[in-house]
Image (spheres, helix red, strand yellow):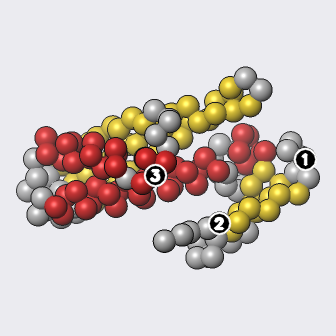
Amino acid sequence: MKRKATAVWKGTGLEGSGTLSAPSGFFDNSPYSFKTRFENEDGTQGTNPEEMIAAAHAGCFNMALSFQIAGKEFAAEELHTTATVSLDKDGEGFSITGIVLDLKGKVPGMDEALFTELAEVAKKNCPISKALSSVPIELKISFSS
């Protein structure tokens, strides 16, 4: 399987702007720029690469965890994960310095210890976590059965 997305950029890094698109149409010509990346914290003016990494990581992690849960013959009522990607100044440029996965899970009949164990396995083994393995990934868990 191969997935792709396209980025188009025009202008300088500070004053230019671009669009991001994917064949699925989920994001089609979504605007991004210096302002949407570094100045527009609420994301109302467009997206940025870190937001897309966060969405990909949260989605991949939830899917991996759902497979772990199903492997123990349970079904999640809901897995709600917010991924927060931190981008910090690093010398002349910037680096992603950490990711926090904030998981709220509800799995009827499962105990919290097993849920936590499975969530750690999913964090370690989802493909996006593996791709981002050079970045510290923290998992925060809130659980109810």
Disc 2 crowd, CA 10 A, few/some/many (<14, 14-19, 20+) = few
Separation of disc 1 and disc 2 at Cα?
A: 21 Å
Q: Earlier in the sequence, mark 1 or mark 2?
A: 2
Task: Tell us which disc is closer to us: 1 or 3.
Answer: 3
- What residue is rendered at 74% in x and 61% in y? 7
- What residue is rendered at 27% in x and 42% in y? 120
Disc 3 crowd, CA 10 A, few/some/many (<14, 14-19, 20+) = some
Residue 106: percent from left, percent from top: 21, 54
Q: Are marks 1 and 3 in contact (CB under 8 Å)?
A: no
Reply above or below: 86 against 34.
above
Q: Which mark is residue 105?
A: none
Residue 81: percent from left, percent from top: 38, 51
Separation of disc 3 and disc 2 at Cα?
A: 16 Å
Asked if residue 52 lies left or right of residue 67, the reply is right
Q: Which mark is residue 5?
A: 2
To which quarter of the image does residue 6 belong? bottom right
Q: Amino acid at mark 1?
A: Thr
Q: Which element is circle 1 on? A: loop
Q: Earlier in the sequence, mark 3 or mark 2?
A: 2
Q: Earlier in the sequence, mark 1 or mark 3?
A: 1
